[in-house]
Image (spheres, rainbow, N blue to C red):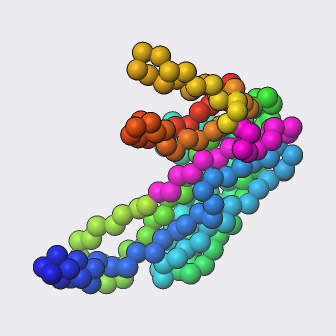
Amino acid sequence: MKKLVALLLAGSVMPAWGGIYIYGTRIIYPAQKKEITVQLMNEGSRSSLVQSWIDDGDTSLPPEKIQVPFVITPPVARVGGGSGQQLKIKQLANSLPKDRESLFFLNVLDIPPNPAESESQNIIKFAMQNRIKFIYRPQGITGVGKNSFSYLHIRYTSGSITIKNNSANWITIPDVTGNSKINKETLLLAPW
């Protein structure tokens, strides 16, 4: 009972948090498209400033230093509460491999506004970053399907498991289980 009361009190003190959501769990950019559109939605009641960028997996670089063959417009936008925003992503140069998919990540940083009543107070604001897979798929490469797993070669030697991906696709394996769960993190297997 004491735990329930504590949870109810904590819930009444904390502000409701709505935020920026990306529609989808990953983005596929087919080579034959000139550009693609990604939909964002602000589920909150207040406006947010949104910064978006694509990286190649190196999270140590700031967005302005990252060099990828894609451009996002708009890179920064104000998204009103209960409103949406479309991001347009266009490929700059076709320097990516044509025989396999290339993996990048779409980042969306949600920066909430300062509350008007906080001008004379010290406040803490949290910016929330969403990061999802962004996969460039060359022409002629099919998507991941049920038969994609037949391209995986699994070898067990000396107490370790080796998985080799012989397909042109990036393959995600969330769980590897035997008598217990073997992997602690989701496996992301590169092509070839």
Instruction: Say left or right for 136 vs 116.
Output: right
Q: Position of residue 68 (x, y in %)?
A: 65, 38
Q: Image quadrant for the N terminus?
A: bottom left
Instruction: Say left or right for 31 vs 28.
Output: right
The magenta stretch spans residue 85? no
Q: Image quadrant for the C terminus?
A: top right
- Name the one closer to the observer, 20 or 68: 20
- Name the one closer to the observer, 168 or 15: 168
Q: Position of residue 138 (x, y in %)?
A: 80, 38
Residue 140 seen from this side: yes
Q: Position of residue 35 (x, y in %)?
A: 79, 53
- Residue 114 vs 150, above or below: the answer is below
- Residue 94 vs 74, above or below: the answer is above
The residue stretch that appears in magenta: 129-148
- Name the one closer to the observer, 105 or 154: 154
Q: Residue at x 59, y 63 (%)?
A: 22
